[in-house]
Amino acid sequence: MTTNSLPARKLHRTRFASSIGFWLLAIPLVLFLAFIVYLCIYLFSNGISVISWSFLTQAPTNGMTAGGIWPCIVGTVLVTFVSLVFSVPIGVFSAIYLSEYAPANLLTSAIRSSIRSLAGIPSIVYGLFGVALFVSAMKLGLSIAASGLTLGLMNLPWIIATAEEAISAIPGSFREGALALGTTKWEAIRYNVLPYALPGILTGVLLALARTMGETAPILFTGVTYYTRQLPTSLSSKFMALPYHLFALATQHDKLLEVRPIAFSTAIVLLVFVLAFDAMAFVFRLRFAGANKWQV
């Protein structure tokens, strides 16, 4: 064996190991994408024939075997809006406090750890907590308000964690430069930190809202109803929602085969709503990242 062949063999082994590593990483991604494509094709092939303008703008009829899903869309939008109004201000201001004002001690670390732990609690636990707090203790009853507040409470840990990470990612020089010019700490945060942290904050908020629109367990106990032709007239009204409507059609209806196309079409509409929020988060991220090159 010549000494000149050793580097060549070592290079060959390195390339072979790199190829193995590439395929070990690529194969799961390809399988995941294939599953997503199959799921979309399966949903659309079974439900696209039902979707029409009347399906989107009419109420269910004949025991939900005909008609549309307009009350479900309205209820989903309203309960998502209530959760947004409740969770976003509290979540963002909590993130600002933890990132900019909270002292670096054991208590702050425990609070951060608790927030991240709460983000992983099953949604049905939040539903039961919403029954105890909003439905019973606060006397809101089974309503849009109780459901929206429960979903907002479920989103708080996620929004706080993502917003804090976005704020903490801003270089300290942005704050120091503003303070050196004589601004107050809040002015430095308001004008030199938050505008650059906005992409990460908006991304977290939109992804949290996308998750909210697909949740069934929290609203199951706090206000959603199986069937109604009436639109909600106030925040104290019961409501229909897309995820629970889909659940009811797929598991609880006495004519499962007859309503199965409606269930598939409802799933398509819900998927479009969720993907729309995800796409908005992606666009916001790209737009603001392009405006602030240092974040890329």
Image: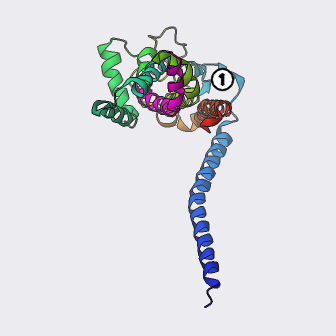
Q: Which residue is mark 1?
A: 56
Q: Quadrant of the N terminus?
A: bottom right
Q: Does residue 131 appear to the left or right of 144 in the view shown?
A: left
Q: Residue 166 lies in magenta, yes or no?
A: yes
Can residue 286 be seen here? The reply is yes
Can residue 225 be seen here? The reply is no
Q: How is the image coloured?
A: rainbow
Report x, y in % for residue 252.
Answer: 46, 33
Q: Quadrant of the C terminus?
A: top right
Element carrying mark 1? helix
Neighbour class for label 1 at 10 Å: few (<14), some, many (≥20)? some
Report x, y in % for residue 249.
Answer: 52, 32
**Residues shaded magenta:** 153-182
Identify residue type, mark 1: Leu
Q: Residue at x 41, y 30 (%)?
A: 157
Q: Residue at x 60, y 23 (%)?
A: 69
Question: Quick check: 10 above or below 152?
Answer: below
Q: Please identify the dominant SS of the magenta region.
A: helix
Report x, y in % for residue 94.
Answer: 41, 23
Give whichever of 165, 243 is nearer the camera: 165
Give whichever of 204, 274 is nearer the camera: 204
Question: Quick check: 84 above or below 125?
Answer: above
Q: Residue 40 lies in magenta, yes or no?
A: no
Tell me where residue 203 sits by quadrant.
top right
